[in-house]
Image (spheres, rainbow, N blue to C red):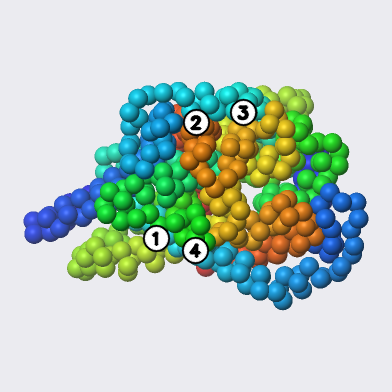
Amino acid sequence: MTTIEAAAAPKAQRRGLRALLLRDYLVLVISVLIVLLPLVYLLFSSFKSPGDLATTQFQLMPETWSTANYDQALDQLPFGRFFLNSAIVTVVGAGLKVLLAIFTAYGLVFCEFPGKTYIFWAVLATLMVPPQVTVLPNFVFISGLGGVDTYWGLILPGLATGFGTFLLRQAFMQLPPEIMEAAELDGAGHWHRLWHHVVPMAGPSIATVALVNVVYEWNDYLWPLVITNDPDMMTLARGITLLRNSDNLAASVGPIMAGTVMVLVPVLLLFAVLQRHIVNGFTQGGVKG
Amino acid sequence: MLPNLALIVMFTYRPLFQNFYYSTLSWELGSSVATKVGLDNYVDFFSSGEAGKVLLTTAIFTVGTVGFSLALGLMVALALNRKLPGAGFAQATVFAPYVLSGFAVALLWLYIFDPNIGALGAILRALGGTSPDWINNPTLTLVMVIIVYVWKNLGYAAVIYLAGLQAVPNDLLEAAMLDGAGPVRRFWSVTFPLLSPTTFFLLVTVILNSLQAFDLLIGLDRLGRGARTLIFDSYLTGFVEADAGRSAMLSTVLFVILVALTLFQLVYVERKVHYR
């Protein structure tokens, strides 16, 4: 739009255009500030001394930098354990999900078997069933099997993956058929074709699915909330809940801010490095709309 | 692929049907005794005043979050579409909150909104005002939850709108300009109508997402005093009050709404394909 306007605009319109650009710049600057300021404020606050934190005066920077909040958080709760648990659940959960999605998508695209279309629709339909709807029966089932406060109990119910299967099926269908045919003529089995041809060629799509799942697992809250009671088995977000047990925020705000930073920073770092892929992953499907 | 299918059956379809079954029980979570009560849970809910209250809260939350996300998202997308220097950075920054933990985001904002020690209250006091009681006034709590939800999810609408804007053909805008249409006129007569598929897509997906919002709600409103939407009510009823039958009934109601919305979208998309 900018270029056409600049080219076609008579001199009298130039001024209006400049005002318009200025307005758009203002919108951008304000939106960036609205997003960044709270995050910066959180980061600074987590390094404030307890006295600075519970003040009624506004103060962006800490008066004295202190790690007291982190010390207190680590002292009150096993935050190291929380961090480890979050990492385990994220890596194992997201890893298995991607593997399952690869296998299922491969089967749906490159294998022939009766009822394939129905199976695809059954997988697709799961996108309509959010985990919130199934949490109660899954809790009854998993806790009945003794899965409360175990890693498998935390990870297993979330593994069923409609989203990843759907995205990878789309990606696999776009691979050039000639290469697959050539591989088949060479006598390569499914296993070989999958790892040596399909996976390398669909690399970017697989990476996207993996990233979305990593973010999803790290942030997941409802399932860890119901399936863990023992602090030693809690993930980070679930763990901070233990600090937030009264309406009097002032009493525990320091450790809460420190814990919140620990939840947010890993995902923010990941996002800073791979933002383009992550944005793509989370908005897939939107482009078609 | 069999393990995945087995998992899907096990942890998506089985619990879905189990949920229907649970919703016909009078059953305390953890108890071994359950009584079949047919549709009594549904009848109780819809004939008492509570259905109206929960559904109203859900509706206000959804309409508020969807309305502001779309309007502000479009505004940001229009600014991003100018390709000004720094637009890439701005786009990434605005999207960032979307990938953050809802619960952690809630805690961050809880600190800012806190009437006693929060930054917002401090700023208002410095300007000579007082902080509204975001925590104890249920209406204000709901307003606070909507504000934070929009902060977190605005970037999604902005990025989708941006993609839609980039698909608006330049020659149409040029033709409108030659006809003497100003920027405002061009937006409402050319750009906005052409964006209607994007708007519709966003409307449905953002409604679906808002109906599923949970982490952020419980983080900001621990006991569900102001933001007790359907899903939040289902959690509190099932896992705090241990009324499993009623909780399953509530999530079944939610599921029916979600399916209805999705089917509505599918039918619409189908029609659009025909038009082309």
- Determine the chain carrying the residue at label 1: B
- Quarter of the image holding residue B253? bottom right
Image vertical order of residue A268 relative to residue B111, above or below: above
- Residue type at mark 1 is Ala
Is A30 in front, or is B40? Answer: B40
Q: Which residue is mark 3?
A: A77
Q: How many marks?
A: 4
Dots 1, 3 in contact, CB < 8 A: no
Q: Which residue is mark 2?
A: A258
- Determine the chain carrying the residue at label 4: B
Q: Earlier in the sequence, mark 4 or mark 1?
A: 1
Dots 2, 1 in contact, CB < 8 A: no
Q: Which residue is mark 4?
A: B139
Q: Which residue is mark 1?
A: B71
- Determine the chain carrying the residue at label 3: A
- Residue type at mark 3 is Leu
Marks 2 and 4 share the same chain: no
Picture coordinates of residue B14, whole percent (x, y): 82, 51
Q: CA distance from mark 3 to mark 4?
A: 34 Å
> What residue is rendered at 33% in x and 41% in y?
A57
In the figure, is residue A52 to the left or right of A189?
left
The residue at the far bottom in this view is B47
Picture coordinates of residue A9, whole percent (x, y): 15, 57
> What residue is rendered at 74% in x and 58% in y?
B247
Q: CA distance from mark 1 to mark 3?
A: 42 Å
Picture coordinates of residue A193, whole percent (x, y): 71, 28
Marks 2 and 1 share the same chain: no
Marks 3 and 2 share the same chain: yes
Q: Earlier in the sequence, mark 3 or mark 2?
A: 3
Is B3 in front, or is A214? Answer: A214
Query: Is residue B119 visible to the viewer in this orientation of the structure?
Result: yes
